[in-house]
Amino acid sequence: MSNRREIFSHRFATSAEKIEQRKKLGSIVQRAGFALILAALLLSFSSLTSGAEEKKKNVDGKWETEDGTPTYHVAEDGTVDWYTYSGFRRYHAECHVCHGPDGEGSTYAPALVQSLKTMSYDDFMLVVASGREVVRADKQSVMPAFGTNHNVMCFIDDIYVYLKARADGAIPRGRPAKRADKPQAARDYEKTCLGEN
Ligand code: HEC
């Protein structure tokens, strides 16, 4: 009799254990499932964001990313958009004395081809407009504020897209060989910005 009861409780225990094991297994499978879904979501998100970078639109000859940030455009034959070309010229008129030719940097000022790999458009604007000064015992450097300089600020998007193209490795060093014609929108904006009409 006692023997039977033992057998019974033993059987009961094993089936209870089995249920417990199944529950554990179930939750492991569930967790693995969540992890898989999460990984799939992350993957599709990253492919979405990298796709977004390629989704540029042309607004009157000026290229911008989906969120409206100015960007460059290089055609298959190497022709750059007007603004990238203009940026090359403006950069070499206003910035290269300190930042070096082609944005490559100097002993005095940082390589903007490196900075723009990570720096946002807004941060770029802020530094150029308000300047930045570092005065330490071991280092003294001054980035002038260009906020009131029309020759810089009227062409700041041009300079930005040029440097961004360099930072992304989309154009080589030197003057772009081929460029798009100057859009009417660029002529109009320039006149208004420089106060010529
Ligand atoms: C008189 C020299 C000088 C000129 C001209 C100059 N810069 Fe600078 N710039 C500097 C120095 C020096 C720094 C680094 C400041 C620091 O240490 O924070 C700097 C920093 C910057 C930064 C921040 C880089 C980073 O990695 O944080 C940007 C962006 C920048 N300059 C853009 C420009 C642009 C665009 C022009 C032309 C319109 C220009 N600079 C002209 C000296 C100059």
Image (cartoon, rainbow, N blue to C red):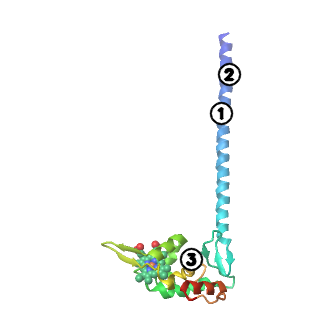
Distance, label 3 to label 1, CA atoms, is: 57 Å
Q: Nearer the viewer, residue 100 or 84?
A: 84
Circle 3 crowding by C-alpha within 10 Å: few under 14, some 14–19, many from 20: many
Residue occupying the point 50% across, 84% down: 150
x, y percent for residue 119: 52, 70
Earlier sequence position, callout 3 versus callout 1: 1
Circle 1 crowding by C-alpha within 10 Å: few under 14, some 14–19, many from 20: few
Earlier sequence position, callout 1 versus callout 2: 2
Amino acid type of the residue tagged 3 in the rendering: Lys
Q: Quadrant of residue 89?
A: bottom right
In the image, which disc is placed on residue 164? 3
Distance, label 1 to label 2, CA atoms, is: 14 Å
Amino acid type of the residue tagged 1 in the rendering: Gln
**Element assignment for label 2:** helix
Residue occupying the point 66% across, 67% down: 52
Q: Is residue 134 above or below residue 197?
A: above
Distance, label 2 to label 3, CA atoms, is: 71 Å
Q: Quadrant of residue 87?
A: bottom right
Q: Nearer the viewer, mark 3 or mark 1?
A: 3
Quadrant occupied by the N terminus? top right
Quadrant occupied by the C terminus? bottom right
Residue occupying the point 68% across, 80% down: 60
Q: Is residue 17 above or below residue 143?
A: above
Instruction: Tell me if label 3 and label 1 are in contact, CB under 8 Å.
Output: no
In the image, which disc is placed on residue 21? 1
Q: Nearer the viewer, mark 2 or mark 3?
A: 3
